[in-house]
Structure formats: structure tokens, C-alpha cells
Image: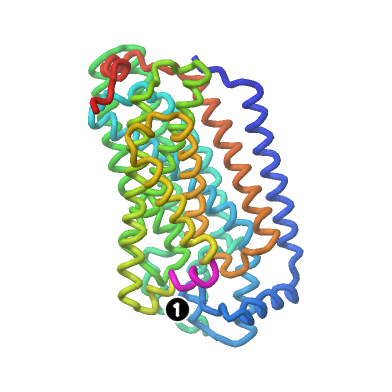
Amino acid sequence: MYSFSPKLKSTSIILLVVGLVLFGIGFFLNKEISTEKIEHMMEAVHASGHNAPTHSSEMVGPQDHQAHLEHAALQVHNQPLASLHFVAVFFFGISCAVLFFYCIQHAAHAGWPIIITRVMEAIASYIPYGGIILVILMFLNIFHQAHLFHWMDPDLTDPNSAHFDVILFEKKRFLNIPFYAIRTIIYVAGASFFAWKLKDQSKKVDETKSKVEYQMLYRWAVGYIAFFGFASAAWAWDWLMSIDPHWYSTMYIWYSMVSCLSSGIAVIILLSVYLKKNGFLPQFNDNHLHDLGVFLFATSMLWTYTWFAQFMLYWYANVPEEVNYFFGRFQHYGTTFLPMLIVNFVLPLLVLVSSSIKRNYKVVTTMAVVVILGHLLDYFNMVMPGTVGPYWKTPEVFILILGAVLFVVGLFMFTVLTALSRLKLIPTGNPYLHESEIYEYPF
């Protein structure tokens, strides 16, 4: 039985509180930014020659100085919620992707990962808490307390408005506030239900050691796989891609999901090794670490494939409405957009390609941390250009992002480790437990 140490509990609470304080400081600093300062920021961006819009919707409506200033003011004041939004979506996606990975193992009747079943269930316990943050952000957006999703502006779909956007008008059947709110609640409530149900069914398998109960666990796992397949695609459209509603990519749902799946596997590695090193999970060995390393390597390569395929197809087609998504990022986010390939592709490729390296605890855990940070940067690049635009290199943004990261990481640590302390670490009722205990990678 795992015991949540007072020191680690204090650390998670400190991270949560410090993150909240920093976010609050950044929020009030952002609110103090005057119109005159925003005008100077806008003129500085234009004077540097970087005047490409961050998304094609900026080219719709009046293009005079006042219109540009109003748009810049919205982008600057988007900084607080945009900073929280990308971190919140990322960690919610991680916990849902871990539950997906867990269900795949049960659906495949895989024996090797049974030892880490409780680790994955504990990570999935974050889902309802992360979901609450996203629901709060949803309400702030639909009541126009934020402007992260500019398609929510009624003027853009009003044919009599000077800001009328025919593309958003055509997409109004899907991109409308009531349907968006319903979908968000379905994602959060559905994932939270499956997280509870799968944990409850797994507990029943332990208590009864019944093959009938195990068969029910299998069926619920298949059910979540189907739910996650549709929901992860739809929330990628809603929470991420609709930030740039003129732009559309069929690769995007895979790209954003694999980013969370790779990070989720990295979190499983960190938590499993932590339990192993502290004597709570002695059954976890080099062979389990090796297989997790294989999945970390494979998902990193899959992420690279989806990133490159999406970029290549749009870039060589050179259609203005499509390539603008990347061009704005090259101009305004050059220091974060392409360099993330180093941590998300180059380092995993060079370090994890060796089979023997995947058995090295220090190397694999280090790469797990690198992968998580790299994909957090990936989500930064998905959200910030379309919401904050070029106005991200300010002290307020760095304070807000640091605060958001510390707050969500502290909450994630606290909920996951608390859930883990309430679970029996070894699923003794699982019929494949013995196979997991004696598992040895054959090559």
C-alpha cells in the first residue's frame, strides 16, 4: 500500500499555492496594461517588420489603425486565460490518454503492464478535477469574460455587421455557443464517468477474482476506447483548432492526441520508477521499463510523423488561408515553434533508439521529463499564437505561464498521489498478474 508522504504532500500544496499566487500577480499586472502601452506594443511589432497576422480571421473586417488597436487589446488581455487554457487542456489530455492506454492493454489482454495498472488508474483520477477547470474556462468564454474563441463574437456571424465573416457564418452549425457548451460537458462528464467506472470495476475484479467481472472490465475498456476516439477528436476541434477557425487540418486530431499520449506514457514512467525506488512497487523491473521506453520512443516518432505530414502538405500547397497558420508562427513564435522538434523528436530519437538504454532508469526518466516539457511547449504553440498573437514576450506572460504550470502540476500531483494512496498497488484479482510478475523481454 502506497503512503502519500507528508513531505511530498506539502510540496504539491506549495506548488499549487505558489502557482495560484503567481497567476494572480500576472493577472493583475495584465489588467493594468493601458491602451497607450498596447498601442506602443503594436507599433513596435509592426516596426520590426513582423506584421503577418497570426490567423487568417484577422484579415476580415475593417483594417484601419483603430481596428488593429482593438484587436491588439483583445490579444493582450487574453494572456491570463490563454496561459491557463493550454496547460489545463494538456494535463486533462494526459490523464485521458493514460486511461486510453490502460484500456488498450485490457482490450488486448496484455499481461506485461498489469503491475502498473494502479499507476494508470491513479493518473486517470485527475480527469474530473482537470475537467472542472475546463468547464470554468468554458463559462468564462461563453459569457464573454474572455476572447479566446473569437467565433463566439455575434458580430462575426451577423450579415449586417462590418465584421461579418462568411467562413464563420458557414461553420455556425457546429461553432455556436450552446452546442460548444454541451460538447464540453459531454467530454468532461463522459471521461470522468469512465475513469470512475473502470476503477470501480477493477476493484470488483480484485475483490471477487471472478472472470465474469474481468469480462465486464474488458467491455468497459472497449467502451472507453470508442468514447475517447470520438471525444479526443472533437475536443481537439473545440478547445484547440477552433482558436484558428478559418484553418482546418485532418491531421490535427491525431497530432494533438499523440502529444498527450506520449506525455502520458512519460508520466507513467516517472510514477512507476518513483514507486520502485521507494520500495512500494518492487515487482516493477527493467523489462517493464524497457516496454514503456519502447512506447515513449514510438509515440515520439508518431508525433513527429503527424507534425511533419501536417506541415508539409500545407506548406507546399501554399494556399494563403492554410499556410498562414504556419507563417504567423514562423514570424512571431520562431524561438518556440521549430526548436520544439529538438526535444520532441531529435532527443528521443538519438537517446531511446537503443534497446539497452531503455533499461537505464536515469536515462529513461530524464527523457520522460524532457518529453513532457517538450509537449507542453507544443501545446503552447497550439494555443498562444491564435489567442495572444505577437504579444507574448512580456513579463506578465512568463509570470502567468509559470503560475498556471505550477498550479496545475501541484493539483495533478496532489490528486494523483492521493488516489494512489487509496488503491491496492497490486491488482491481485487480475488473471494476468502472474504473467506480469515473471515478464521478461525476449530480445
Q: Is residue 413 rendered to the left or right of residue 76?
A: left
Task: Tell me what residue is drawn at x 58 percent, y 42 percent.
Answer: 408
Q: Quadrant of residue 241?
A: bottom left
Above or below, 262 against 163 in this view is: above
Residue 329 percent location from the top left of the image: 49, 68
The magenta stretch is 326-333
Name the amino acid, label 1.
Asp
Above or below, 272 against 72 in this view is: above
Element at badge 1?
loop
Q: Indicate yes or no whether the magenta region holds residue 321.
A: no
What is the chief secondary structure element of the magenta stretch?
A: helix
Quarter of the picture containing the C terminus is: top left
Q: Is residue 358 rendered to the left or right of residue 71?
A: left
Task: Tell me what residue is drawn at x 34 percent, y 38 percent.
Answer: 354
Task: Tell me what residue is drawn at x 69 percent, y 39 percent.
Answer: 17
Above or below, 109 against 63 in this view is: above
Q: Which residue is mark 1?
A: 165
Q: Residue 423 or 366: which is nearer the viewer?
A: 366
Q: Indicate yes or no whether the magenta region holds residue 328.
A: yes
Residue 6 percent location from the top left of the image: 65, 21
Name, please, the residue furthest toward the bottom.
Answer: 64
Q: Report the number of discs.
A: 1
Q: Is residue 155 rendered to the left or right of residue 9?
A: left
